[in-house]
Image (cartoon, rainbow, N blue to C red):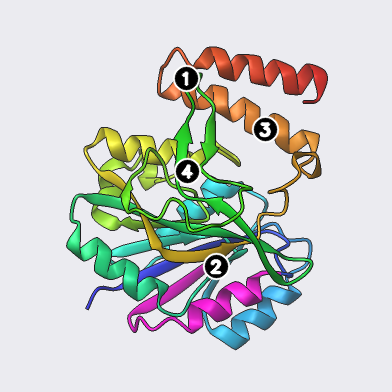
């Protein structure tokens, strides 16, 4: 039986983490363990309460960044876990999601990372938005990376399983052998130079360079409560600057003429607050 370990990074995630963990607990897959790494929540009360309820392994840290926190979670996963699921605390799976995903990975040994059809979820209203969140990450002709379908009404489009350029970090089911092959110094799987944003794309690119495929499975449907999905203005200027800066960093690590787009974007965000 294939063993799966789930890594969840929390940061003031009290509104969503309980729902995420409940969905993990309800998975039909039997061999499953969970590691939660908290990156500097202002209060740990909600974490202690949830740990008592769900029995996951909890590691509390300062706000060391999303990449470093995921790397720590990966290092704490049981050595027998063959598949590692990196899951956002605001991502909620159906009960059979992981069992289906494990079957798909077994049938496709060339796939190093599998992502799902992510559907929008309104945290404040506690219900689906009816909009798509991500069906894989793609790159436009001028170099902009984007979540395909994000913000569009969900009409069942993008319903074909396919290889995609990159996977959204909200749900990344990765093969341990693939992660170990592309690991950086110290065994890091996510590049610690990316504090937040674009780290999922960078890992996807590293996997692809080593011959692994990034798979998109539309039958795996996961709700994702991305808070700023419909209105970019809800994302703070500071976070938009981090995202723009990391796009430049991405093209420095994976050289491309598309860095021109990244530079223009960064100047626009920094100078004009776009």
The residue wearing badge 2 is: 36
The answer to whether any part of residue 62 appears in the image is: yes
Residue tagged 1: 252
N-term mark: 4 or 3: 4
Residue at 27% over, 44% down: 213
Residue at mark 4 to residue at mark 3: CA–CA distance: 15 Å
Report crowding for label 1: few under 14, some 14 to 19, many 20 or more residues within 10 A (C-alpha).
Answer: few
Q: Earlier in the sequence, mark 2 or mark 4?
A: 2
Residue 56 percent coordinates (x, y): 52, 78
The answer for how far apart the CA atoms under marks 4 and 1 are is: 16 Å
The residues bearing labels 1 and 3 have C-alpha atoms spaced at a distance of 15 Å
Q: Which residue is mark 3?
A: 242
Q: How far, Cα to Cα, is label 2 from label 4?
A: 18 Å
The residue tagged 4 is 200
- Which class describes the residues within 10 Å of circle 3: few (<14), some (14-19), or many (20+)? some
Going by the picture, which residue comes out furthest to the front?
155
On-image quarter of the N terminus:
bottom left
Residue that sits furthest to the bottom in the current view:
53
Given residues 211 and 40, the one toward you in this image is: 211
Answer with the quarter of the image where residue 220 lies: bottom left
Crowd rating for badge 2 (residues with CA inside 10 Å; few <14, some 14–19, many 20+): many
Q: Are marks 2 and 4 in contact (CB under 8 Å)?
A: no
Rendering coords of residue 170 (x, y %): 53, 55
Is residue 80 at least partly visible in the picture?
A: no
Q: Quadrant of the C terminus?
A: top right
- At x 56% / y 60%, what residue is drawn? 119
Magenta stretch, residue numbers: 16-37
Residue 129 shown left or right of residue 77 in the figure: right
Q: Quadrant of residue 29?
A: bottom left
Place of residue 125 in the rendered image (x, y in percent of width and height, measured from the top left): 78, 69
């Amino acid at each position: 039986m294939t063993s799966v370990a789930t890594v969840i990074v929390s940061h003031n995630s009290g509104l969503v983490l309980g729902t995420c963990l409940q969905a993990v607990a309800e998975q039909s897959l039997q061999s499953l363990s969970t590691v939660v790494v908290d990156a500097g929540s202002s209060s740990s009360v909600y974490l202690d309460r949830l740990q008592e309820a769900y029995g996951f392994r909890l590691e509390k840290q300062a706000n060391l960044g999303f990449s470093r926190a995921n790397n720590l979670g990966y290092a704490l996963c049981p050595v027998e876990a063959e598949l590692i699921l990196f899951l956002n605390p605001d991502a909620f799976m159906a009960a059979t999601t992981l069992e289906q995903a494990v079957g798909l990975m077994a049938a496709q040994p060339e796939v190093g990372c599998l992502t799902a059809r992510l559907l929008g979820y309104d945290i404040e209203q506690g219900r689906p938005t009816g909009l798509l969140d991500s069906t894989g990450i793609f790159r436009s002709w001028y170099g902009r990376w984007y979540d395909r379908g994000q913000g569009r009404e969900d009409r069942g489009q993008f319903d074909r399983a396919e290889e995609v350029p990159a996977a959204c970090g909200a749900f990344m089911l990765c093969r341990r052998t693939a992660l170990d092959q592309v690991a950086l110094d110290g065994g890091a799987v996510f590049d610690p130079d990316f504090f937040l944003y674009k780290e999922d794309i960078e890992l996807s690119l590293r996997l692809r360079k080593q011959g692994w495929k990034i798979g998109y499975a539309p039958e795996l449907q996961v709700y994702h409560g991305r808070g700023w999905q419909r209105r970019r203005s809800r994302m703070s200027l500071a976070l938009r600057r981090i995202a723009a800066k990391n796009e430049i960093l991405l093209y420095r690590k994976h050289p491309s003429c598309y860095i021109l787009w990244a530079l223009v974007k960064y100047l626009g965000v920094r100078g004009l607050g776009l």
